Image: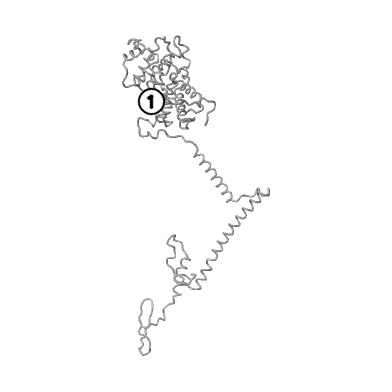
Amino acid sequence: MVISDENSLVQIKPTNAQGGRTFGAEIRPNRRALGVINHELGGANHPYPCVANKRSLTETNGICNKDAAFHVHRPITRQYAAEMALSQQPRVVEAKKLKTSVNELIVWEDISLTDVEDHGEAKDQPVPMSLEHSKSEMRGKNQMEEVEMEDIFEETVADIDVCDAKNPLAVVDYVEDLYVYYKKMESLSCVSPDYMAQQFDINERMRAILIDWLIEVHHKFDLRDETLFLTVNLIDRFLAKQSVARKKLQLVGLVAMLLACKYEEVSVPVVDDLVFISDKAYQRKEVLEMESLMLNTLQFNMSVPTAYVFMRRFLKAAQSDRKLELLSFFLIELCLVEYEMLKYPPSFLAAAAIYTAQCTIYGVAQWSKTCERHTNFSEDELLECSRLIIGFHQQAATGKLTGVHRKYNTSKFGYASRCEPAHFLVQTTIPQ
C-alpha cells in the first residue's frame, strides 16, 4: 500500500504474522538524514554537527554567542570534554601572564627605588604611575588628617540668632544691619573726653557725684536700664555744649532723667516728683525752662546708640547667664560715674565690661571667637580698659560714691557687687 502526501512518499508492506515482522513497520526510502537537514538549516560552515539554535542571540544584549549555543546543544561526550578543556587553556594562560606581569612590576619598582637611592644616574628615570598615585594618596591622607585635627581644636563662630529665628521681635533678618548702623552712629553720641575744661563752675568730681546720685534715683523709681544710660548721655552732651553754674547742675540731671523717661518709659514720673526728690531746691517753672533749653541745645536728637544697646547684643554673643549679665551691668555702671571713661566709645566700653565680667567669674582670661566677631574687638584691645574697670571694682565699696555698689548688693541684682575682682588682669602678664 502506498500513501502519498506533500512531503514524502512512504511505502508500507503488510506482512503476515508468521513471517515474524510486526504489522505497521515502515520502509522510508525517501527520508533525508538528520545531518543533511542540519547542514541546510545551519549552513555549510557550521562548526558543529548539531541542531541549529534559533535563539542564537543572547537575551541580555542581543549579541550572537556561539559558545552559548555550543554549551547548550552539544551532547556531553569525551570529545566534547576535551574540546572544552582546550578552549579554556588560553584564558588560564592569560591570567598567569597577568599575574606574572604584576609581580615583575612590583620587583621593578623596588629595584628602581634602590637604584635611585644608591646611584645618582637613576634620578632621571620615570617614576611608575602606581608609585606616583600611592605617594599622592598618602600625602593627601596626611593633609586630611592634619585638617581634621585642626578642625577639632579650632574654635568656631556660633550663630547667636538661630534660637530667635521665629521671634519677630528679634528682627533676625536685619539685626546685623542694625548694629552696623549703630556702630556708624555712635560717634554722634560721644563727647569730647576733655569737655569739662570749658566749664567754669563745675568739675569732674561734681559730675561723678551727680551721676552716682541719679543711679540711686533711677533704682528707687524702678526705671528701665535704657533710661539710665540715655540720662547720662544727655547730661554729657548738654554739658559739652552749654556752660552750667554749680547750683544748676542737679537740675540738669533731673531734667535729663525726665527726658529719658519720656523717651523710654511707659509711665513717666511727674514734674512734682522730681521737685520733691531735689528737696525742693527748684520750682516747677525752672524744670520746664531747663527742659526747653536742653532739647533745643541737643536739637531734639534723642535717638542715639548708648552702651546699653551694645550690651544686649554682646551679652548674647557671650552666651551669658543671669550672673554674668548682672556683673557686666554692675561694672559698666561703675564706668558711667567715671569721667575718664568718656574716651571710650559705647560699644568698646560694653565689650570691655563683659570681658572683665567673664574674667571675674571664670578666673581666667576668656574672650571667644564669637564675642570677637560680634564686637569687632580683640582681647588685646580690651585689656587696658578692662584693667581700669577692675580698679573701679576694687574701690566700689570705699569712699563716698558707693551708690552703684549698694544697688548691686541686693538680692534683686544677685549680690553682684560682692564678687571678688579679677586681680590677675591687673598684673603685667596674664596667666593662660
**Hey, which quadrant is residue 270 in on the image?**
top left
- What secondary structure is found at the residue carrying circle 1? helix
Q: Position of residue 259 (x, y in %)?
A: 36, 17
Q: Is residue 110 above or below residue 279?
A: below
Q: How is the image coloured?
A: one colour
The three-letter code of the residue at mark 1 reads Phe
Sort mark 1 into few (<14), some (14-19) or many (20+) by Cα contacts within 10 Å.
some
Q: Closest to the observer: 103 or 64?
A: 103
Do we see residue 188 in this rendering? Answer: no
Q: Determine whether, in the image, residue 20 is placed left or right of residue 148.
A: left
Q: Is residue 143 shown above or below 4? A: above
From the top left corner, tell me how far across and down residue 223 is, in percent.
35, 21
Task: Tell me if 115 is positioned left or right of 362 in this view.
Answer: right
Depth order, front residue of 132/87: 132
Q: Examine the image and state in which quarter residue 142 appears.
A: top right
Location of mark 1 (residue) = 413
Total tally of numbered discs in the picture: 1
- Residue 160 appears in the rendering: yes
Task: Look at 32% across and 15% down and name the residue there.
Answer: 273
Q: Horizontal and vertical percent for residue 204?
A: 46, 14
The image shows residue 137 at horizontal and vertical percentages of: 55, 47
